[in-house]
Image (cartoon, rainbow, N blue to C red):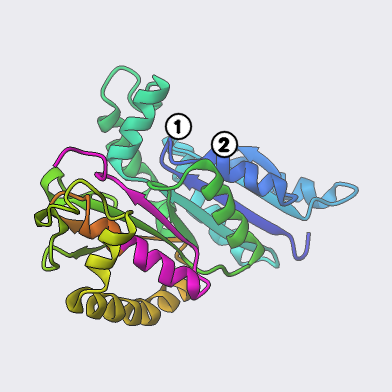
Amino acid sequence: MKGAQIVFVSGLSGSGKSTAMAALEDQGFYCVDNLPAPLIEQFVDLCAKAAPQTPKIALALDAREPQLLAQVPAVVGRLRTSDRSVDVLFLDCSEKVLVNRYRETRRVHPLSPDGSVEAGIGQERILLRDIAALADQVVDTSQLNVHELRAAVTRWIAGESRASVVNLISFGFRYGTPEELELLFDVRFLANPYFEAALRERTGLDEEVARYVIESDRGAAFLSRLEDWLEFLLPLYDREGKSYLTIGIGCTGGRHRSVAMAEALAGALRDHGREANVRHRDVEKPQ
């Protein structure tokens, strides 16, 4: 089957392999789950002899059969020396998110049915490390919902580039730093509306509070420099195929300064054609 496209999909249990396979199926791939390694090449040959041929194949791999999984790198290597296009997609995810997903679904981990989910995750990471080393594309699904993951897989397999989406989170250091942040900016150096009686009970979503923060000398200078820095940085992330960038902006309570700055930065990014989402984690918490 000259020119056939074969995609192997692997990753940690709970990281979204089923979602990724569904996205590939929507792209016209013939999808097979957990085919034993010794049968993969036979299956590919059968697809070549079918009438009509099956030019696009997606094979999901997991760690349920460690002895057979150990044979996969050799199989992938042999297929890559043929005329076929062979790619490996690996889905990763943080342990904390995986544990929460298992708790929400009340499922046991397949590698630790009588033990802890954490133990199963640790064992699975070890078993899959050789597969992960083969990956042409690694997607961290920790902060992706099913729709975002489907979109990321579709963009990757279709070879379409898309500008990184910026997710902005305002928060108060008083309540802890969000774990999902990739970049963090502390705006506690800005004048605090909390100490203005007329502004204290409002939030950074209020126009007057926003002006107080953003139109101050420090606020305007910081926002301008931050825009310039992201104008340089974001295209670099785009070229690396990064789907999402999560930026945190923190102040003391997460109600005034961080909220106003996150909203202003999101507006500036949108003015430049960048998709930007904003979440104000602590804006409703008591001060």
Q: Which mark is residue 64?
A: 1
Position of 148 with respect to 264 (left or right) is right
Q: Nearer the viewer, residue 112 or 214?
A: 214
**Proximity of marks 2 and 1: CB atoms separated by less than 8 Å:** yes
Magenta stretch: includes residue 105 = no
Counting residues from the N terminus, which is met first, the one under dot 2 or under dot 1? 2
Residue at 63%, 47% in the rendered image: 23
Q: Residues within 10 Å of mark 2 (few under 14, many from 20)?
A: some
Residue lying at 80% horizontally and 50% vertically, measured from the top left: 54
Q: Nearer the viewer, residue 122 or 96?
A: 96
**Residue found farthest to the front:** 198
Q: Identify which residue, 216 or 164, lies in the foreground.
A: 216
Q: Let me know if residue 134 appears in the view.
A: yes
Can residue 135 be spotted in the picture? no
Mark 1 neighbour class, 10 Å CA radius: few under 14, some 14 to 19, many 20 or more: some
Q: Quadrant of the N terminus?
A: bottom right
Q: Is residue 267 magenta?
A: yes
Q: Is residue 180 above or below residue 247?
A: above
Say above or below: 204 vs 33: below
Kind of residue sitting beneath label 1? Arg
Q: Position of residue 220 (x, y in %)?
A: 26, 77
Q: Which residues are magenta?
A: 262-287
Left or right placement of residue 105 versus residue 203 in this view = right
Task: From this view, report whether residue 15 is shown above or below residue 114.
Answer: below
Q: Position of residue 198 (x, y in %)?
A: 18, 53
| Separation of residues labelled 2 and 1 (CA atoms) | 9 Å
Name the one closer to the observer, 82 or 203.
203
Q: Which residue is mark 2?
A: 34
Q: Position of residue 159 (x, y in %)?
A: 63, 67
Q: Which mark is residue 139?
A: none
Q: Farthest residue toward the right?
A: 51
